Amino acid sequence: MKKLLLLIIIISACQQSQKPSAPVKQAPKEPERALSLSLQEGPVEPIGPIEIFSQEMPLPDDSKGTRILLDQVRLFETGEPYVRVELQDNFDWKAIDSLKKYADSVVYQDGHETVRTRYPWSRAREYLDLELLDGITIFNYEHKNFGDSKLKRIEFLEHMLGHEFVAVLGPREKLTGEKFYGINGINDFVNALSSRVINQSEIQNSVKKYIKANPKHEWHISGSIAYPYNLVHTVYSFVTNEGDEKSYLFETNSGLSNKVMSELTNDYIILDLTHVPVQINSRPLLLLWVGYPETDIEGHTPAIFNGVNYEITNSRILELNKFRNPKK
């Protein structure tokens, strides 16, 4: 089973085992942003979309490296950054109930439902997937590079929505910003990358018209432009009149031409994206925020350009060589 969905199932199943009389379909929220699946009502920018594009600039070379990690980095109340830890492939998700007994000393407890307990290295190496967790380079969503981090310890985290294993990271410097992501396995980043959120009515209406959308209900629409690529990537999620849940990832170039880069039907929906400073086939990688409508189930997954469209990987570990030869 795909690892992104496996994490969701682990959290949800743990909740059900704790409260058998009231099964819950939930996964841990990220504290810095709640899942919002209401009708998009935010302001749109009235300026013409052509004004957001800069002068054409040469693109950097594609990033080197073969096997990388890309994932969301969250912060504890103490300010410590952490990432999720998955079970090794040979362990069924139900094993978490037997593996948690090895957690040996409380690191933090907030007096409510959050308890962080140290997990011994010997057990972590035996049962958990620790690949590429040491040396993660942390960025904020403005793409400031905070340098590589050290893997400090593994913890078993219990909270109001379930429990999970996490890796606590030690950054080189104090993190500033609200949201963060981490990359490991590569060090030749696209330092020229910059991006910003845009909500221009011209582009939003253009992508809706492109797919002839006639939604019964809209979950979310938003976009982000990436420089020096001069490309806008827009996510649009809605319910059709036939009741299907649709989610699209569009690309709009400086000539205002649209293209569907990914499409999901009756699956999780795409809620947001950020560009990241790794380039394959002359496009930046994306980190997508995804979730299931009307639930607290959410997560992050990379998307990588294969030469034709963006493939949503559902795995934070990426084999870059699988994508380097563009599809024809």
Image (tube, helix red, strand yellow):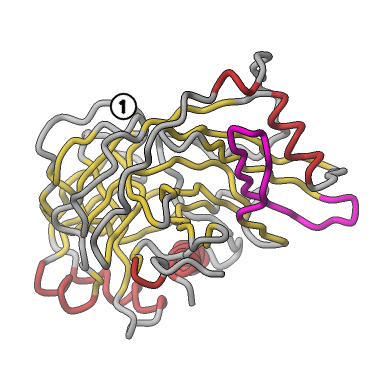
Query: Percent from the top left, x then y, of residue 271?
Result: 58, 43
Residue at x-position 33% and y-position 49%:
278
SS class, disc 1: loop
Q: Is residue 14 above or below residue 272?
A: below
Quadrant in the rendering for residue 265:
bottom right
Would you call the spot at circle 1 few (<14 residues within 10 Å), some (14-19), or many (20 or more)?
A: few
Query: Percent from the top left, x then y, of residue 178?
Result: 35, 29
Residue at x-position 35% and y-position 35%:
193
Residue at x-position 28% and y-position 61%:
68
Q: Nearer the viewer, residue 249 or 159?
A: 249
Q: Is residue 160 above or below residue 126?
A: above
Q: Quadrant of the C terminus?
A: bottom right
Q: Which residues, given as a range, are shown in magenta? A: 240-261
Residue at x-position 56% and y-position 61%:
308
Left or right: where 148 falls relative to 227 = left
Q: Is residue 15 visible?
A: no
Query: Percent from the top left, x then y, of residue 2?
Result: 47, 72
Left or right: where 212 falls relative to 183 = right
State yes or no: residue 327 in magenta: no
Q: Is residue 112 visible?
A: yes
Q: Nearer the viewer, residue 185 or 227?
A: 227
State yes or no: residue 258 in magenta: yes
Question: Where does label 1 land, which residue?
Answer: 177
Q: Is residue 146 above or below residue 288?
A: above
Q: Amino acid at mark 1?
A: Gly
Q: Nearer the viewer, residue 260 or 271?
A: 260
